[in-house]
Image (cartoon, rainbow, N blue to C red):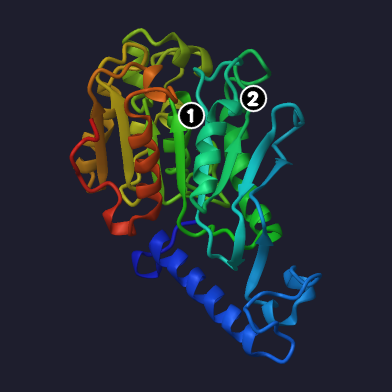
Amino acid sequence: MRVSPQGTRSRSARLRLGAALIALLLLATSCSPGGTGDGVTPSGSGSPASSPTLSGDVVADRDEPLVKRVRYPVQGEADPSQNWGDLYLPAGRHPEKSVPLVVLIHGGSWRSGAGAASFDGYADYLVSRGMAVYNIEYRRVGSGGGWPITFTDVADALDFIPELSEEHPEFTTDDELVVGYSAGAQLAAWAGSRDSAEEHELGAHPRFVPTRVLSLAGPLDMTYGAKHGDGSIVDVLGGSPEQVPERYADVDPIQNIDPAVPVVAVHGTADTRVAPENSQRYIEALRERGGRGGLHLLKGETHGSLFDAQGAHHAEILDLIVQTSEAPADQVGVPSPSPG
């Protein structure tokens, strides 16, 4: 959820704080009458609930990452086969609100076919870096989605995050990154601009809004894309910009810019599926509104190769996600040289 810049700490600062707290707890345990003298909790008392010295401080203690599937509630009747998210939690001992959260929204032209599993590799990498990850699935055109269900599903999945945090209080909810690829990037950028001020808007009254967004090959100007032959946009919104202008006004990222939310856009220069002009036009508009936008154009990358684990820039993209998550709030989206 959004907080003021004065109240926002960088991810690296949070992790340093968590490490410091853990070190103090280990020292206290080793010096206490019930300690082992070597900083190790006695056998059989490794969980916070069974160790009074950890109560209220360390809220999670696990030897390996935890991956669990969760079902999020939706407006109307849910589809259990699609209304879910995979929650990844890192190994280690974690104080409350010490683990940064990254939300992943997959692409696939808003159509059935590609699903959340396409982001599993990213999730595995990020959790290995000490982050929590929420990789969401949602209904799409051809599997019960389309207008407006695809969009309300994503909104509902995000609005479930506060409940997940109550169950797993180690991860943060106040300054979070959402990453999307292709159609998922449009959904991520829209998620960063949901506004409860307008009752008619889709996704109004959000319970969770990210404070930073990273778009991979995103159709961030849906009107531009639809007018230049992107039939997937017309399909998911149920018409052209001329036929259903109010729908474009609701979810087209470039029509819903929030200057307070920085956006980093990554696009391949050889992308013929979603033209790089989408990212260029969006970042230019964001900057004109006084917002912070970072644009990374990767030379020679196509729409598919940008997301390929064997692609030339895959490692740089993963690093960019980590950097965007960890950077101080006022440094996200600051123009920087392209990784390519």
Q: Give how far across and how far down residue 287 sits, in percent.
A: 21, 42
Label 1 and label 2: CA atoms lie apart by 12 Å
- Tell whether label 2 touches label 1 (CB within 8 Å): no
Q: Tell how many labels.
A: 2
Q: Amino acid at mark 1?
A: Gly
Q: Quadrant of residue 321?
A: top left
Q: Quadrant of residue 252?
A: top left
Q: Give how far across and how far down residue 149 sits, in percent.
A: 62, 27
Dot 1, crowdedness within 10 Å: few (<14), some or many (≥20)? many
Q: Residue 139: which disc?
A: 2
Q: Nearer the viewer, residue 179 or 72?
A: 179
On the picture, is 86 further left or further right than 318? right
Q: Residue 209: which disc?
A: none
Q: Nearer the viewer, residue 84 or 303?
A: 303
Any part of residue 200 in sight = no
Q: Give how far across and how far down residue 339 sits, in percent.
A: 24, 35
| Residue that label 1 marks | 184
Q: Quadrant of residue 143?
A: top right
Q: Residue at x 45, y 38 (%)?
A: 179
Q: Give how far across and how far down residue 256 sits, in percent.
A: 38, 37
Q: Amino acid at mark 2?
A: Arg
Dot 2, crowdedness within 10 Å: few (<14), some or many (≥20)? many
Q: Residue at x 38, y 64 (%)?
A: 4
Compared with 239, 327 (above or below) is below
